[in-house]
Amino acid sequence: MKEIIFPTINLSLKINSIAVNILGTDIYWYAIFIIGAIVIGLVLCKIDDGKYNIKFDNIISLFLILIPISIICARLYYVLFRLEYYISNPLKILNIRDGGLAIYGGIIGGTITTYTYSKIKKINFLDLLDYIVPFLALGQAIGRWGNFFNQEAFGTQTNSIFRMGIIENGNYIEVHPTFLYESICNLAIFIILYIMRNKRKYKGQLTYMYLTLYGVARCFIEGMRTDSLMIGNFRISQLLSINLIAIFGTILIYKAIKKESRNE
């Protein structure tokens, strides 16, 4: 049992990363939030059945392969950038119940899987991505609360009004609740994309918006975290986020300018 304190609102919580034990098997909150995010995403996808001429049956078929591949890729991404540790502890590679999934790895694996599926089923790739990305953002917003229960993905010490008090190596410290920051940002991205899904001007618009907005949010939030995957002195997620902003932000601006010139 761990204690987490939010001093500004005088709130103290006792939390356990294990939600319940069933027949001797521990079920972690982390897994419950991920499964909950998937279920909610599928329900919302069902509501959008037929949007962009994509049937919900196609989404179900895609998710059956997309989810396991994305989880595997998210884990592989995390392991590859902590390779020295996992070479010394190979049995821990398969232990994802305590965390260790990198969302960018999941996005990369999921994008490749979605592209392959779209070609096999002869569905427009950008339409398929636009159908999915609003619910991906919502899933990320929900999934981040698994980090809260694992007491991970927090930031540097701070005296911010949003600070969170935890016990780290036997010492009480107050840190940025970066899991909360990202959850809120992802929720905001979901709301924007959910509204825009009926107003998109071209194929891929929602996808480009998601990658740009998430890139901006993650770039700033990653700078506060203490558990970043690194290449030398650089935070990998920040480098990737900057590239996403540059590439897809440029596409959005180009498309907007092009549309404006046509209206003149």
Image (cartoon, grey):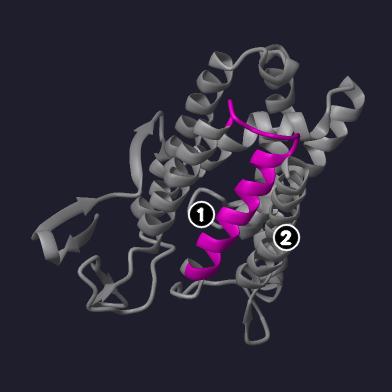
Name the one closer to the observer, 16 or 92.
16
Instruction: Tell me: 176 left or right of 54.
Output: left
Q: Does the magenta stretch include residue 206?
A: yes
Q: Is residue 125 above or below residue 2?
A: above
Name the one closer to the observer, 62 or 101.
62
- Classed neighbour count for the residue bearing mark 1: other residues with Cα under 10 Å, few (<14), some (14–19), many (≥20): some
State the extent of the magenta-drawn residues as a range. Answer: 197-220
Q: Hey, what amino acid is under mark 2?
A: Thr
Q: Looking at the picture, how far across and down is residue 235, in whole percent?
A: 61, 76
- Toward which corner of the image does residue 113 lie, by quadrant? top right
Magenta span main SS: helix
Residue furthest out toward the bottom = 233
| Residue appearing at x 35%, y 44% in the figure | 18
- Image quarter (top left, top right, bottom left or bottom right) of the C terminus: top right
Closer to viewer: mark 2 or mark 1: 2
Q: Looking at the picture, how far across and down is residue 173, in whole percent?
A: 24, 77
Q: Does the magenta stretch include residue 205?
A: yes
Name the one closer to the observer, 92 or 45.
45
| Residue appearing at x 67%, y 12% in the figure | 50
Q: Earlier in the sequence, mark 2 or mark 1?
A: 1
Query: At numbered mark 2, what does the secondary structure look like: helix, strand or loop?
Result: helix
Instruction: Tell me: 147 left or right of 108.
Output: left
Residue labelled with disc 1: 99
Q: Looking at the picture, how far across and down is residue 259, in whole percent?
A: 74, 44
Q: In this view, does 227 lie above or below 79?
A: below
Residue furthest out toward the left = 10
Q: Which numbered dot is residue 250?
A: 2
Query: At numbered mark 1, what does the secondary structure look like: helix, strand or loop?
Result: loop
Q: Distance between the residues labelled 2 and 1?
A: 34 Å
Q: Is residue 216 above or below residue 72?
A: below
| Residue appearing at x 63%, y 13% in the figure | 49
